[in-house]
Image (tube, helix red, strand yellow):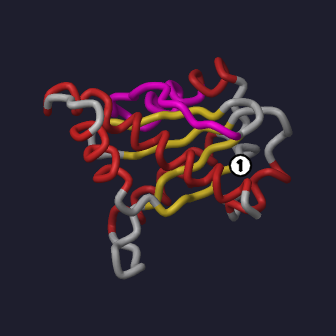
Amino acid sequence: MAVVDLIDLPAIAPPNTPLVGLDLGEKTIGVAVSDATRMVASPLGLIRKTKFTDDAKALFKLMESRRASGIVIGLPVNMDGTEGTRCQSNRAFARNLLRLREDLPIAFWDERMSTMAVNRMLVGEADMTRARRADVVDKMAAAWILQGALDRLRNL
């Protein structure tokens, strides 16, 4: 399977199975998961990046434990709508995942401002210190990304 358009994901991923959302950072991968009805996204955890194969193994293990059937990866599009090197890196990550699991449906979601929005929420509403935010921001950003995609799918 190839990377699919987000609106095609529900037809490809088996019904009543969760989706996983990813926020790909330089050092970590934030992971979130939806419920089986794909209504609500929740932060799940962090994968500390090492080698790609180890990162993929950890991701697949998380997916299997939740019976997740597809992935939504945040795409850090520039504010002017262009794609820079981070977008290329995220697309390459998806291609590499597909080399390991050809049957895995993967879609992208524009993640502009997700980390900033999460940081603002963690400071303003949760009153978290900078050190504590560093531990949760990537998985919260993954949940923000996945929730945005779920909301879009619900409003088709």
Q: Position of residue 21 (x, y in %)?
A: 54, 42
How many dots with numbers?
A: 1
Amino acid, disc 1: Pro
Residue pictured at 48% horizontal, 54% vertical = 74
- Give the residue at x 71% y 44%: 104
- Establish if 125 lies above or below 67: below
Q: Residue furthest front?
A: 125
Residue at 52 percent across and 51 percent down: it is 73
Out of 135 and 53, give the one closest to the viewer. Answer: 135
Q: Residues within 10 Å of mark 1 (few under 14, many from 20)?
A: many
Q: Position of residue 8 (x, y in %)?
A: 78, 60
Q: Nearer the viewer, residue 13 or 116?
A: 116
Identify the residue at the far top of this view: 65
> x and y percent of residue 7 in the render?
74, 62
Helix, strand or loop status at disc 1: loop
Could you say where residue 35 lies in the image, as x and y percent from the top left?
Answer: 68, 30
Name the image quarter holding residue 37. top right
Question: Does residue 83 appear to the left or right of 125 in the view shown?
Answer: right
Q: Is residue 49 above or below residue 145?
A: above
Q: Residue at x 39, y 46 (%)?
A: 24
Relative side of 39 to 149, left or right: right
Compared across the picture, whether 76 is left or right of 57 comes to: left
Residue bearing mark 1: 105
User: Quick check: is 41 in the magenta stretch?
Assistant: yes
Q: Within the image, what quadrant is residue 140 found in?
A: top left
The residue range painted magenta reads: 39-60
Q: Is residue 5 magenta?
A: no
| Quadrant in which the C terminus appears | bottom right
